[in-house]
Amino acid sequence: MTNVKIGKPIPDFKLPGTSDAEFRMADKKGKIVVLYFYPKDNTPGCTRESQDFRDLYPEFAGAGAEIYGISRDSLKSHDNFKAKYSLPFELLSDADETACKLFDVIKEKFMYGRKVLGIERSTFLVGKDGVLVREWRKVRVNGHAEEVLEAVRAL
């Protein structure tokens, strides 16, 4: 699989999601899609980022956008995380790193003084035509969801 590039169509991929939903990129033609990759359920930054997208969800929906959170966590972990924070959108499990590799978000990081491979917080905005419109890498949580919403509104 080739990596995604701005201005190019996103290759089809599928992932299992919460609420027994299966996400398939090809099924999203005609819709604006926000895919946000985050390292781990129930960690401070990931929780805050998910809550920010939750709080702005009505505005995203009003602008015609669907939001999906993606991490390597299990569906059970995602179901608990989604319920605990009343997230109104689906979380997708990428345990085998299919989408992570496609979007090139697995990076070497340092945790507790050791090198580990993990998800670099990243968000991707896909237009109705299935083409990648914008990407944010090395995301800082504060103000990020608002910035993505402004980009959605600009489409």
Image: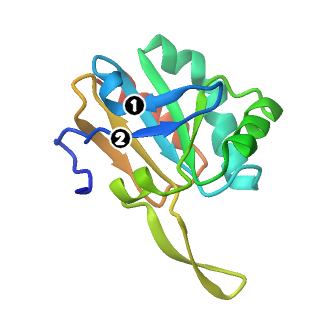
Residue 4 shown left or right of residue 123 in the figure: left
* Residue situated in front as seen by the camera: 59 or 95: 95
Which residue reaches farthest right? 84
Q: Is residue 127 left or right of residue 67?
A: left
Q: Which mark is residue 24?
A: 1
Residue at 77%, 50% in the rendered image: 42
Q: Residue at x 63, y 44 (%)?
A: 49
From the top left corner, tell me how far across and down residue 12 is, in percent: 29, 38
SS under mark 2? loop
Which residue is identified by label 2? Answer: 13
Residue 40, horizontal then vertical, whole percent: 67, 55
Looking at the picture, does residue 97 appear above or below residue 81? Answer: below
Image quadrant assignment for residue 111: bottom right
Q: Quadrant of the C terminus?
A: top left
Nearest to the observer: residue 51 or residue 38 = 38
Task: Kindly give the residue lying farthest to the top in the view shown.
Answer: 62
Could you tell whether 34 is left or right of 119 in the image?
left
Residue 122 appears at what percent x and percent y?
46, 52
- Measure the alpha-carbon separation of dots 1 and 2: 6 Å
Which amino acid lies under the numbered mark 2 shown in the image of this protein?
Answer: Phe
Q: Secondary structure at mark 1?
A: strand
Asked if the residues shown at circle 1 and circle 2 are in contact, with their CB atoms under 8 angstroms apart, the answer is yes
- Within 10 Å of disc 2 (Cα), the crowding (few <14, some 14-19, many 20+) is some
Q: Residue at x 78, y 33 (%)?
A: 85
- The answer to which quarter of the image holds residue 153 is top left
